[in-house]
C-alpha cells in the first residue's frame, strides 16, 4: 500500500506568477514556484492564466517575444496546463477572476494562491478549495522553508 502523501495541487493566479518572474527575489511567490520545480507541489495553470501573464510581462515589464517564449517554455517544464470546462460568474467586479476560479475548480485544487485581496482572497474558500495569499500558503504548508 502506498503511504506517500498525495502531491498538493495548487492553482496560482496571474499576479503570483508575475511577481515570481518579474521580481525574482526570495519572495513568497518565487518560493512557491521553487516548490513546484522541486516536485513538492503540483502547480496547475490554464491557458488564460498564461496568456494574462504574458500580456502583463509585455506591457508592464517590456518583455519582448523572445523573452516571453523562453519564460513560457521554462514554466511548462514544471507547471501543469489545464483547459477548464467550468464556467462561473461568481465574481461580478472583474470577470477574469472567474477564469482563475474555474481553473482551481476543474483542477480539483487543494489551494488557490492569489495576491488578489479585493475579490479572490476575501472568499476564503470556494467549493472546498482554500484561497490563500502566497505568505499564508507558505506559513501553513511549508513553515520551515
Image: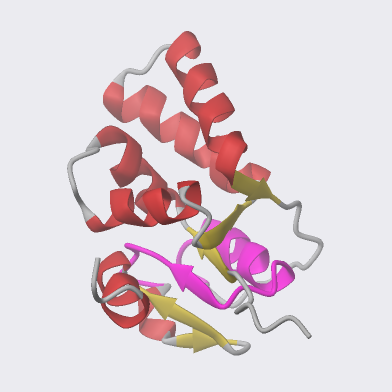
Rendered location of residue 7, percent (x, y): 60, 70
Q: Quadrant of the C terminus?
A: bottom left
Please name whichever residue, 86 or 77, is drawn nearer the observer in this view of the structure: 77
In the drawing, does residue 39 fall left or right of residue 46? left
**Which residue occupies 75% across, 67% down?**
87
Rendered location of residue 78, percent (x, y): 57, 43
Q: Where 119 sits versus 71, above or below?
A: below
In the drawing, does residue 40 fall left or right of residue 119? right
Q: In the picture, residue 20 is in which quadrant?
A: top left
Please name whichever residue, 70 or 3, is drawn nearer the observer in this view of the structure: 3
Please name whichever residue, 38 or 135, is drawn nearer the observer in this view of the structure: 38
Please name whichever residue, 88 or 67, is drawn nearer the observer in this view of the structure: 67
Q: Quadrant of the N terminus?
A: bottom right
**Which residue occupies 70% across, 67% down?**
107
Rendered location of residue 98, percent (x, y): 59, 65
| Residue 96 in view here | yes
**How has the structure been colored for display?**
secondary structure
Rendered location of residue 141, percent (x, y): 37, 78
Q: In the picture, residue 118 is in which quadrant?
A: bottom left
**Which residue occupies 69% across, 74% down?**
108
In the drawing, does residue 126 fall left or right of residue 22? right
Indicate yes or no whether the magenta region holds residue 108.
yes
| Residue 95 in view here | no
- Residues in magenta? 92-119
**Name of the residue lying farthest toward the front:** 1
Indicate yes or no whether the magenta region holds residue 117.
yes
**Which residue occupies 38% across, 49% down?**
34
In the drawing, does residue 84 fall left or right of residue 36? right
Q: Where 50 sits versus 84, above or below?
A: above
Amino acid at each position: 500500500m502506498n503511504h506517500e502523501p498525495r502531491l498538493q495541487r495548487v492553482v496560482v493566479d496571474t499576479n503570483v506568477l508575475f511577481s515570481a518572474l518579474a521580481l525574482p527575489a526570495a519572495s513568497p511567490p518565487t518560493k512557491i514556484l521553487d516548490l513546484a520545480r522541486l516536485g513538492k507541489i503540483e502547480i496547475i495553470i490554464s491557458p488564460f492564466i498564461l496568456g494574462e501573464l504574458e500580456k502583463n510581462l509585455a506591457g508592464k515589464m517590456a518583455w519582448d517575444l523572445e523573452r516571453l517564449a523562453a519564460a513560457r517554455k521554462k514554466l511548462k517544464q514544471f507547471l501543469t496546463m489545464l483547459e477548464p470546462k467550468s464556467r462561473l460568474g461568481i465574481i461580478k467586479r472583474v470577470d477574469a477572476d472567474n477564469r482563475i476560479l474555474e481553473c482551481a475548480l476543474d483542477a480539483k485544487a487543494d489551494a488557490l494562491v492569489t495576491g488578489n485581496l479585493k475579490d479572490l482572497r476575501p472568499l476564503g474558500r470556494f467549493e472546498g478549495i482554500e484561497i490563500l495569499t502566497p505568505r499564508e500558503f507558505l506559513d501553513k504548508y511549508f513553515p520551515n522553508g
